[in-house]
Amino acid sequence: MLDNRVGKKIREAREDAGMTQEQLAEKAGLSLATITSLEENRTDDVMACILVKVADALGKKLDDIFFS
């Protein structure tokens, strides 16, 4: 499972951007199920490219989301 802080940080960044999960999924080119799974920490193996897509869709760098 993902560290529970990862999902929380993604959710916080999404909400700060004023986006719904659906909007983030569409903008990132990912499924709603993927975004939901990330935010709820229901996945064991996340490829870095997925996190990059999420960060890009939010207009942020990975460091800004996960290390700030």
Image (tube, grey):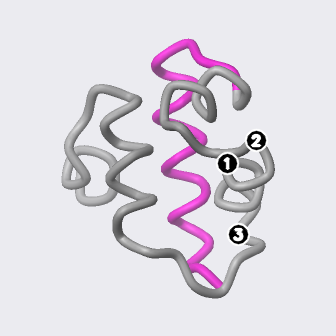
Does 29 sit above or below residue 33? above
**Pointer 1 with pointer 2, Cβ within 8 A:** yes
Give the extent of the magenta segment.
Answer: 1-20
Dot 1 alpha-carbon crowd within 10 angstroms: few under 14, some 14 to 19, many 20 or more: many
- Is 37 part of what is drawn in magenta? no
Count of number-bearing discs: 3
Q: The residue under label 3 is which amino acid type?
A: Asn
Question: What residue would you read off at disc 3?
Answer: 41
Helix, strand or loop for disc 2: helix
Helix, strand or loop for disc 1: helix
Nearer the observer, disc 3 or disc 1? 1
Q: Position of residue 6 (x, y in %)?
A: 51, 64
Q: Position of residue 50 (x, y in %)?
A: 45, 59
Q: Which mark is residue 32?
A: 2
Question: What residue would you read off at disc 1?
Answer: 35
**Pointer 3 with pointer 1, Cβ within 8 A:** no
